[in-house]
Image: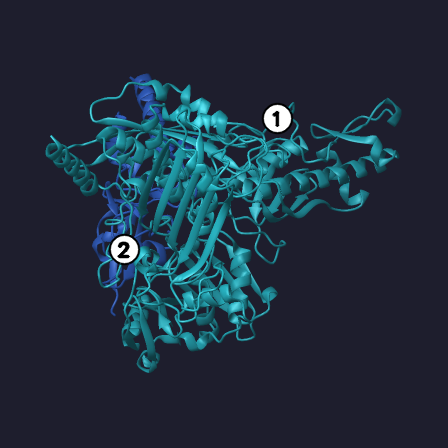
Chain colours: A blue, B cyan
Amino acid sequence: MSGITVNTKINGDPVEFICDADETLLDVLRNRLGLTGAKEGCSTGDCGACSVTIDGRLTCSCLVLGAEAEGHNIGTIEGMANGEELHPLQKKFIEHAALQCGICTPGFLIAAKSLLDKNPDPTESEIRFGLAGNLCRCTGYDKIVRAVQDVAKGMRNNKAKRA
Amino acid sequence: MPLDNAPDSKRKFNVVGTRPLRPDGIDKVTGRAKFGADASAPGQLVGRILRSPHAHAVIRKIDTSKAEKLAGVKAVITRDDFPDHTDGDAALYDTMYNIMAREKALYEGHAVAAVAATTASIARQALKLIKVDYEILPHVTDVDEAMKPNAPLLHKKMFTDGVDPKPKKPSNVARRFEFGHGDVEEGFKKADIIVERSFKTEATHQGYIEPHAALASMSPDGSADLWCCTQGHYMVRDVCARILGIDISRLRVTQSEIGGGFGGKTTVFIEPVALALSRKANRPVKVVMTRDEVFKATGPTSSTSMDIKIGVTKDGLITAADGTFRYQGGPFAGCSPAEFGAMSAFAQFHLDNVRAIGYDVVCNRPKTISYRAPGAPMANFAVESVIEELAHKLGMAPIDFRIKNAAREGTKSSYGPVYGPIGLGPTLEAAKNHPHFKAPLGPNQGRGMAAGFWFNFGGQSCVSLNIPTDGTITVSVGSPDIGGSRASMCMMVAEELGIGYEHVRAIIADTSSLGHNDVTDGSRTTFATGMACILAARDAIKKLCQRAAATWGIPEDAVTWEKGFAKPAGANAGNFAPLSLKEIAAASPGTGGPIAGHHEFSADGAGVSFATHICDVEIDPETGASKIVRYTVIQDAGKAVHPSYVEGQFQGGAVQGIGWALNEEYIYGKDGRLQNAGFLDYRIPVCSDLPMIDTQILEIPNPGHPYGVRGVGETSIVPPLAAIANAVAAATGVRFTQLPLSPPRVLKGIEDAKAKGKKAA
C-alpha cells in the first residue's frame, strides 16, 4: 500500500506523517506517533476513549482517517497540561478520585474541556449529557461529574475576580 | 509494639481514613500511564485470531497453507501448535481448549487459528485465506433448554457430578450443589404465607473499557517475556507456562496498567496465543482484541433460571427458604458461579430451615468468568424480590421484615459457617434512618430496597519493602492495582512506620521480582495484600529497632518504635535521643547493610460483607423506560482505608447493577450468534442515565485484620438488581421476574396488567 503524506499540527506542533489509506487517526496517533494517551475501547465511536479535538471540535479519533487530518489542528491529552502545570480538570480529577482504572480518563478530560470551553457554567444535567459519549465502567460517573462541577466553579470564580 | 492481628478499637489513625492523592494520578490524567495496548517492542509483529462463525461445529480440517504463503505472514498457528501438556488437569485443559478450539468449536467466537504478520492489514488478509472445514451441529444457548433431556449435547462424557447415584446418561448439567440446614418441608408446614416464584436473568458482560492486550516475546529456547493487562500476572505466568510446556520460571510476566477487569481478567485468552505465535515467528508479537472479540470470546457472567419459595408466619418470621439456581457457564464444566449463587442466596437471613440447590450447566456460549461477586446478584434479585412480595402480603414494612429476619453475630449462615461480627443489621437500620428513605416520591415513581451479601476472600500475597539511605520507602506488591490500591498500600505502610504518605511509593513488581500473589479478586487486595504490607512494615520496624539497639548498645527488646522514631522503651533502657527512620537509614551501610521488610502468607479472616441499597425509579408509562432518580448505597467497609476509593467501589458496583437490571443483556439469534456485540447495542449506563450515587460507609471492624478492614469491591453489585426490580414493582404495581427491565418488557408488563384489570372488571 502506498503511503499518504499528511501535514498537521498536533498540540500546536507541526507534525508530518505518512499513513496508509485505511488507517484511522487513532491508529496514526498511537502506532506511528507514539501518542498512546488516546485509547481504543471500541473502534466504533461508542466509548469516547479515543477522544481528541480537531480544530477545537470534540471527535472520536477512531472514526476519522489519518489522511483526513491534513491541514487540521489536532488536540490530544498529551497537550492538555502546560509543562509542569496540570490543567484544572486534570488536578480536580485526581483530587475527586474521579478515576479508578484510568483507561477512560484521557477521553473524559478531552470531552470535559470541550464542554467547558463551550459552556463554562453547565448545570449537572448539561454536564451529564455533555459527557454521555464517554463510557466509564468503574466510577458510576458520580465523582467525574463532581470534579467537572468543581472546575467550572473555580473557572467562574477566577473570571469574577478578573472582572 | 503489638504484633497480633486483632484490630485495636481504640487505635487513632494518622494516615488511614484520610484522602491523599493517588500516586498514579498524574500518569493517568496526562496519558502517560501504559496500559495493555500501549507497549511495543522492536521488530514486533501484529497477531490476530480467526474465530468460529458457528455456535457448535466439528472442526474437520484447517488449511493454513495459503495464509502461510502470503508475503508478510511470519507464523500461523492452530490447535496443532498446542500439544496437550495439561497432565490430566481438567480445568487447565478446558482453559487451553477455550483459547484455541480443538475437536469442536463450542461457541460463536471460539478461536480456531491465529496469525502473526508484519502489519495489521496483512494479518487480516491472512485470516481470510485460512480455510476451516466445519460440520455444523445443533446448538443450545438457553439454560433451561440445555437442561432438557433431548437438548443438543456439548460433551458426550459429561455425567452430572454431585448426584447419587451418578447418572448413566450424559447431559449438559455438569454438577449439582446443595447447601442448607434444618428441614425445609417441616418449615413450610409452620408457615402462614408462602410465596413461590420463578425468575430469569440474562448474561451480562463485565464491560471493562480496555480490551485484552498482550505483547509476547518468546525465544525458541523457551525463555519468554509477556506484557499484558490482567488481574493476576502470576496466574497468567503459571497457566501460560503449563499450556506451552515450559518451566514457570522461564516466563516473566509484567502487568500493564489495567483498564478495568471486574473479574473478567482473571483468566487467559490471548496471552498463550501471543506467546505461541512469538515462539513460532521468533519475534515479538502483539495481540489486541477488538470490542467485538471481547463480547464474543471473553467472560460474560451466567444467564440464569431460578425458583424461590419462602414461607413466613403471620407475625413475619421466616420459617423456611428454598431455592433452585440454574446457571449456564458457557461450554465448560465448573465455570458458572452456580455454587456461589446457591451459597449466597439466603446469606442475609437468620434461618432455621434453608436449602439452596445449584446447577452448573453448559451451553454454546462463551466460557463465563467471574463478574464482581460472581453468582450473587442474580440469586439476590430472585430472593429479595420474593422477600418484598412477602412483606406486602404480611402488611409489614419491607425494611422491618428484613430487620426482623436479618442474620446477626452467631447466626448459622445458609452456606454453613457461623457469623462473627457482621454489619447487616447496622446497614438496615442506617437505611431506615436515612433521609432518602423518608423523602417524598413524585408521580410514576417507586422506591425499592434490597440487602446483599458477599463472602470476600484472603489468599496468597507476598510483599517486599525497601528502605534506601534517605529513609523513604519503596513497597513492591504483586497485586495488580485495579482501582487505586497503590494509594491504600502506601497509606498502610505510612501508618505503621509513622511517616508521611508522601514518603512511600508502591510499585507492582513483575513475576520474576517478587514471590507469588493470587489474582486481584474476591475483594482481597486491600485486605490481604494490605495486611502483608502492614506486616512487612512491622518486619522492617523490627530491623530498624535492632539497628538502633546496636547503635546504643542496649538489648533489642529495650527499643520501641513510635511515630517514625526508635526510642528507648523506658527509663531503665537508658537515656538516648530518639533515632528517626531517616537517621537509621542513613547509617545503614555501616550498621549491617540495607534494611528491608518482607511478608509472605496466605491470609485468612476476610470478613464477610453486607450492604443495603435504596433506589427510586421513575417509569414513563408511555414507553416503559425507567430512570433512576435517586440511589443510596450503605455498606460495611470494616475500616475504610481511603474513603474516596471505598465510595468509588460502592458507586461503581451500584451502577454496574443498574445496567444489569435495566438494559444489559446478551441477545442471541436462532443461529446461536450474538446479535449485540458492541457498546451501541449492548448498552452500559452512560452519565446522562444516572443521578449522583449517595454513599454511607459503616465501619464494623473485621476481627481478621489489624485495622479491621473488610473487602469492599464486590458487595455493591449484589443488591441493585433486586432494589430496582422492587422499585419498578412499586412504581407500576407489576412484579417483574425477568431481567433486564428494558422498556419493551416493562411496557408489556404494564399493558398486560391493565388488560387483566379490565377483564376482571
Q: Nearer the viewer, residue B683 or B272?
A: B683
Residue drawn at 28 percent across, 62 percent down: A19
Residue named by callout 1: B13
Identify the chain of the residue marked 1, using the numbered disc in the image.
Answer: B
Mark 2 crowdedness (10 Å alpha carbons): few <14, some 14-19, many ≥20: some
Position in image of residue B161 (x %, y %): 48, 61
The reply to whether dot 1 and dot 2 touch (C-beta < 8 Å) is no
Q: Tag 2: residue type? A: Ala
Which quadrant holds residue B147? bottom left
Q: Nearer the viewer, residue A131 or B383?
A: B383
Residue drawn at 51 percent across, 39 percent down: B23
Residue drawn at 31 percent across, 68 percent down: B56
Q: Earlier in the sequence, mark 1 or mark 2?
A: 1
Which quadrant holds residue B104? bottom left
Q: Secondary structure at mark 1?
A: loop
Foreground: disc 1 or disc 2: 2
Identify the chain of the residue marked 2, using the numbered disc in the image.
Answer: B
Q: Nearer the viewer, residue B348 or B105?
A: B348
Position in image of residue B761 (x %, y %): 11, 30
Q: Tag 1: residue type? A: Phe
- Asked if residue B138 is positioned above or below residue B342 in the image, the reply reads below
Evaluate whether residue B721 shows in this view. Answer: yes
Q: Gap in Å between the C-alphas at discs 1 and 2?
A: 48 Å
For the N terminus of chain B, the image quarter is top right
Residue B481 is labelled as none
Position in image of residue B153 (x %, y %): 34, 68
Q: Nearer the viewer, residue B278 or A160?
A: B278
Q: Secondary structure at mark 2?
A: loop
Residue named by callout 2: B677
Evaluate whether residue B649 shows in this view. Answer: no
